[in-house]
Amino acid sequence: MIKFLILIKKIIKWSFLVCGRAYVGINNIEWKLNPRTEFFDHNVDLLQVWNGRGLEAFERGVFNSFFIKKDSLVMELCCGDGFFSKQFYSQKAKKIVAVDYNIESHFFSTQMNASNKIQFMNESVLSDVFWNNLPSSFDNIICDAAIDRFTEEQSEYLFNKISQKLSKDGVFSGYLTVGNSHLTERSFSTSTELRSYFEKKFKVITILQSNHRDRSGLFFALQNFDK
């Protein structure tokens, strides 16, 4: 009996591998035909785990989830495809507001990562109208792989809004890639640099660096000074 069950599992696993490679292949064709830089389909990362890739792509989801308490009100800024809101943050949050200004990423997130816990919004995080129509406060505000895309002036505006919307014990957390990119306005090479950048604006809880063979990431968790 056990041999038969193992055979069935092997067949199912093989089917996952074939489907995963097909999905990744379609994604690669899509990128060649219509290159996009505003969001990435993280289902590709999930499927590539079956093909031997590590789990580093999901570190941000685990890290941010650590600071989310049960039934929290969460906002994810620049949510991209919505994968992390659906697969990680919605497991603990009561409600999530996930916003991205890019119309393609908004459509993708509503089709591929919809949840009755998540309100996807196609808005600019640099708009007063957006911030004025949100709930009064959030327990967690998350921004992954996007903080370094804003100019100094835009960052100042964004941090002020985040500070206003963060609850007394709330946490602002996120992730960014170490080093330069044509997509970013600034770059951070070490956790010390990032700490210096944040510490005048927020009380730093922790900043961690994670190194892998093809990239390194910086993870941050911040709170307001006495509010």
Image (cartoon, rainbow, N blue to C red):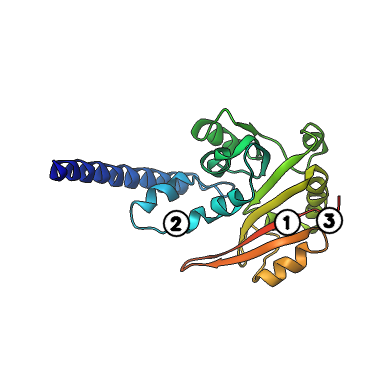
Neighbours of disc 3 within 10 Å: few (<14), some (14-19), many (20+): some
Q: Secondary structure at mark 1?
A: strand
Q: Secondary structure at mark 3?
A: loop
Q: Nearer the viewer, residue 177 or 35?
A: 177
User: Which residue is found at the position 34% from the left and 45% from the top?
Assistant: 20
- Label 1, on which residue? 222
* Mark closest to the chain's N terminus, 1 or 2: 2
Image quadrant where residue 152 sits: bottom right
* CA gap, disc 1 and disc 2: 25 Å
**Could you say which disc has been placed on residue 55 in the image?**
2
User: Which residue is found at the position 55% from the left and 50% from the top?
Assistant: 61
Seen from this angle, which residue lies furthest top?
116
Image quadrant where residue 165 sits: top right
* CA gap, disc 3 and disc 1: 9 Å
Q: Secondary structure at mark 2?
A: loop
Image x and y of residue 121, in percent: 66, 33
Q: Is residue 206 above or below residue 20?
A: below
Image quadrant where residue 177 sits: bottom right
Neighbours of disc 2 within 10 Å: few (<14), some (14-19), many (20+): few
- Frontmost of labels 2 and 3 is 3
Amino acid carrying mark 1 in the image: Leu
- Label 3, on which residue? 225
Amino acid carrying mark 3 in the image: Phe
Amino acid carrying mark 2 in the image: Leu
Label pair 3/1, CB-CB below 8 angstroms: no
